[in-house]
Image (cartoon, coloured by chain):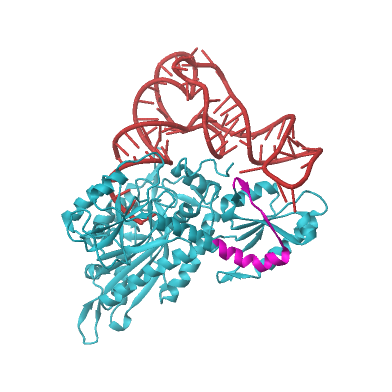
Amino acid sequence: MHALKVTRAEDFPEWYQAIVREADLAELSPTRGCMIIKPWGYGIWERIQGELDRRIKAAGCENYYFPMMIPLSFIAKEAEHVDGFAKEMAVVTHHRLKAVDGTLRPDPEAELAEPLILRPTSETIIGDAFSRWIKSYRDLPLMLNQWANIVRWEMRTRMFLRTAEFLWQEGHTAHANQTDAVAETMRALEMYRSFAEEFLALPVVAGEKPENERFPGAVSTFSIEAMMQDGKALQAGTSHYLGTHFAEAQNIRYQDNEGGMTLAHTTSWGVSTRLIGGVIMTHGDDDGLRAPPAIAPRQIVIVPMLRGKPEDVELSAYCAALASDLSALTVFGAPLRAFVDAKDARPADKRWDWVRRGAPIICEIGPRDAAGANVTFIKRNALREGEKVKSHTFSRADFLVQAVALLESTQAELFNEAKARLENNIRDDFASFADLERYFGEDKEGEFKGWARVHWSRPTGAALDAVGERLKALKLTIRNAPLTQPSAFRPCIFSGKPGVEEILIARAY
RNA sequence: CGGGGUGUAGCUCAGCCUGGUAGAGCAUUAGCUUUGGGAGCUAAGGGUCGCGAGUUCGAAUCCCGCCGCCCCGACCA
């Protein structure tokens, strides 16, 4: 008997929906395609923000904020950029409502002279500011970041993974030359890789996107890719070297130390609330979420086994003192987050709520524990032994000594489990495209298929499109070319030509 | 935006074929009992059956239109 009604094996998409709801992370909103992020889900985002913001600032960036609405003309400034985003833009056209035949409608007489778009990303409006802020080589590098909401009118939405509005951070930097800008692009990518692995316990493969998967307007795009429990790949973060494309389109020039005017090289990079979807699909099990302790809004939850009897008073005091002592500890560089769930509800119900939400350690303290100075707890990432829930009892003193280690080991175990899944499910024994077709061509119900690691001749243009079509027939996409490349290459799996690069192929979200 | 499915109480769903005025389980509220682990009994509250128009004496049920959600596809963080 699991805490969720649907298991991963039965129906992965249904399980995903169930866990988002049952773990109290988010719910659908009345606004089409948008979600309401609830406190437990938003708490996870706040942890992500806190740690990533620290790392972004440590790299020398400062935060700022740009408007959500961008003049329509701005988006038209970079040709490829327009092509990439035009189809999913929300447009503000009026500034006033008027009752027409009893219903409120935009007032035809209040149409904006120039429509505004809701930002699908901010390169254009930020580039405009950069062109005014950057005068001299002394102004470079300019390294800025904003935490913002983004609107992209998606045809098909899924909670956290793809919603019409989502939250993210977008870093934008300008540099004197290509070398510096590329270095910054790679720094951001490595920041995301280490953040995902260390903080979210999300093992990823960092690499460069093929030409046809680049960000609209970028010279090169890099990503981190994570493997979900259904074998699909999730792009969990991106970093772009934009070359001088946006600088040309928006006149971002500086006077170099010889007096000449030179185009700046820009970058942009971002991660979004999609990361939470990645955490769910990586660490969730059939009992709900297993939140990595580093991002769990509450790391140790104490459920007092209150029974409406006089000893409840002592029990409550015991639990409060335990939480207080735990809160004085430091874990993952911050005060330990302990919480007593004093809600007037049945203890068993409270226990299962926290199991579904994925609190890393759930203490269940009864009068006997209090009297004997013990702590009985369950470790969420190793909840069951067989079918049964496994609980542990430590002395209070031991528990206080062990608490930090328990959280750290939970974090490590979640990472190792996911890391093993990633490493064990990348096949590199495809000698030909026919091999790939044999493996990915036939789908049995519920069959798990991981990723493929193959070599290719890195075709471009029409030849690359042809490769994309052949992969599409198998529902596959090229995820990226990992940064770590082998020293020698097998022949191209698509053309038989000499291989020049190793790439990852997978089904993707 | 194309194909398929679906929409009835907070959740999961029955009722629809064969039209007759709203149901179950869980959840909620109250009371009693129970108490080392998703309790039991009793009672109560909660739904203009997605929205709109039609057929009909009468529509959750039949017809038409629209919308949301889910899955697949195209597109994408």
Measured from the top left, where is residue A501 in percent x and y? 25, 63
Colour red, chain = B
Residue interval drawn in magenta: A386-410
User: Residue drawn at (71%, 49%), measured in percent from left and top?
Assistant: A344
Judged from this view, the residue extending furthest toward the bottom is: A258
Q: Is residue A248 left or right of residue B68?
A: left
Instruction: Locate residue A174: give its quadrant.
Output: bottom left
Residue A367 drawn above or below residue A21: below
Instruction: Locate residue A139: give its quadrant.
Output: bottom left
Image hue for chain A: cyan
User: Residue drawn at (63%, 49%), measured in percent from left and top?
Assistant: A389
Q: Is residue A210 left or right of residue A388?
A: left
Name the chief secondary structure element in magenta: helix
Examine the structure image and report whether residue A112 is included in the region drawn in magenta: no
Asked whether the viewer can see residue A29, the reply is no
Measured from the top left, where is residue B48 in percent x and y? 52, 30
Question: Closer to the camera, A46 or A105?
Answer: A46
Residue A41 drawn above or below residue B4: below
User: Residue drawn at (22%, 64%), measured in percent from left and top?
Assistant: A500
User: Residue drawn at (32%, 41%), measured in percent from left and top?
Assistant: A442
Instruction: Locate residue A438: give its quadrant.
Output: top left
Measured from the top left, where is residue A368 in percent x and y? 78, 55
Question: Closer to the camera, B15 or A372?
Answer: A372
Examine the structure image and report whether residue A398 is included in the region drawn in magenta: yes
